[in-house]
Image (cartoon, coloured by chain):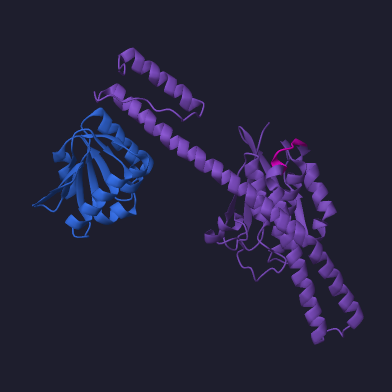
Chain colours: A purple, B blue
Amino acid sequence: MTDFSDDKRLNAILDMIGRIASLDFTEMLEVSEENDMVDAISLGLNMLSEELNSQVVDKKILHEVNAKLEKFAYTVAHDLKSPLNSQAGLIKLLELTLNPDPNSDIDECITKLKRMNEKMKSLVEGVLSYSLAQSKAIEKEEVDLKELVEEVIEIDNFNEKADIEIRNELPVVFFNRTGATQIVRNLLDNAIKYSNKTRCVINIESEEKNKHYEIRFIDNGPGIPPEYQEKIFQLFNQIDPSLKTDSVGIGLATIKSIIEASGGKIWLNSKQGEGSTFIFTINKK
Amino acid sequence: MEYRENEKIKFTLRDDNILQTECFPNTIMNLEDGKESTRISAEMVNYEPLPLLCDLTNVVRMSQDCRKHFAGPEHAETFSKAALIVTNPISKIIGNFFLGLNKPIKPTKLFTSKEEGLKWLKS
């Protein structure tokens, strides 16, 4: 016969709370027919345990599916690299063999083929970077952001394409160096790529907050309409795919993934015609 | 007034066009019971959504998938809004779980008396 004395029931409730805390959802509490407060608490804990269990299971399945998808994307992108490089070589060989007159139909076709090949390569590189973005949050080291920004500007010759100014001291952060480089490179590259001014101007500044640093990249570009301000951080989302042939809509999604995997956030302040400010946060140690 | 019942629930289509349901004592509701209840209700309201006055007092358990069903689109096609009557600790916790976790599509509120529930349904 079931013992429904108050002490036993309360002890059973304590045990149940302990099991739920350790994510053990295998047992349920007995509920008597008294329909009293202890019964209500027992039933509530049973229902809570059931709900938590299905959420934990759903999350686990989602993680597994995501991991498989990322592995699949990485494998496909990796396997596509080699034939695309061969294709680029063949196009070059075709160009050398035919030696077409500039502005001829053949010359135009070869130029188009080259552009398509470059775009495919960008896409494949982008998918590879995106697939690896999560892992870039794992290995962290001290990174002097000012030094890193200057290094990226120099290596990529960004100073030839834009006036870039670091407005105040950028912090030394604990972050993955490759990930940070990718964030800086993508933000500068995007500002330059989409600039509609004769000279692109980019200002970089930082602000120390209580638990994190806020880093801002401010450009004088065309601005981004409100309806696109969240979408641009999604994979394969571009404001206008036809505008920029070398843009594949992966860069900002990759940045977002790197930042969020490190516990930070990225967002955008922009008004059409008044430039954009990309803001991201990096947690202090 | 129209009245029907099955093994677990009594259904009354009141003269004021509110469907009232009440369970028999110590009722355990599973998904099948929920679906059967929606089927009978839909027939009684002639497939035109009406307000529901649902007395949970005699319900002692309601399974997770049954709560999901009552919160979902099929039930919302049958009822325009729902007043849930909870008069004891068990029915109160079931009602609170239903509102908090399942987030029903149609407007749904908990009441401790039928009068208050009816007043809200008619407002």
| B39 relative to A186 in the view: left or right | left
The segment highlighted magenta reads A136-142
Residue A117: in magenta span: no
Q: Residue furthest front?
A: A1
Q: Residue at x 30, y 46 (%)?
A: B32
Q: Is residue B54 left or right of residue A82?
A: left
Residue A275 image position (x, y, % from top left): 63, 59
Expressed as whole percent of the image width and height from the top left, the position of residue B43 reads 20, 57
| Residue located at (65% from left, 44% from top) | A259
Camera-side residue of A160 and B49: B49
At horizontal 26% and vertical 42% (from top left) the residue drawn is: B109
Which of these two is toward me, A243 or A127? A127
Q: Is residue A93 above or below residue A214?
A: below
Residue nearer the viewer, A23 or A104: A23
Residue A195: x and y in percent read 69, 63
Q: Quadrant of residue B73?
A: bottom left
**Quadrant assignment for the N terminus of chain A:** top left
User: Residue A42 placed where, x, y %?
Assistant: 34, 26
In the image, is residue B57 above or below residue A156? Answer: above
Quadrant for the C terminus of chain A, please.
top right
| Residue A32 visible to the viewer | yes
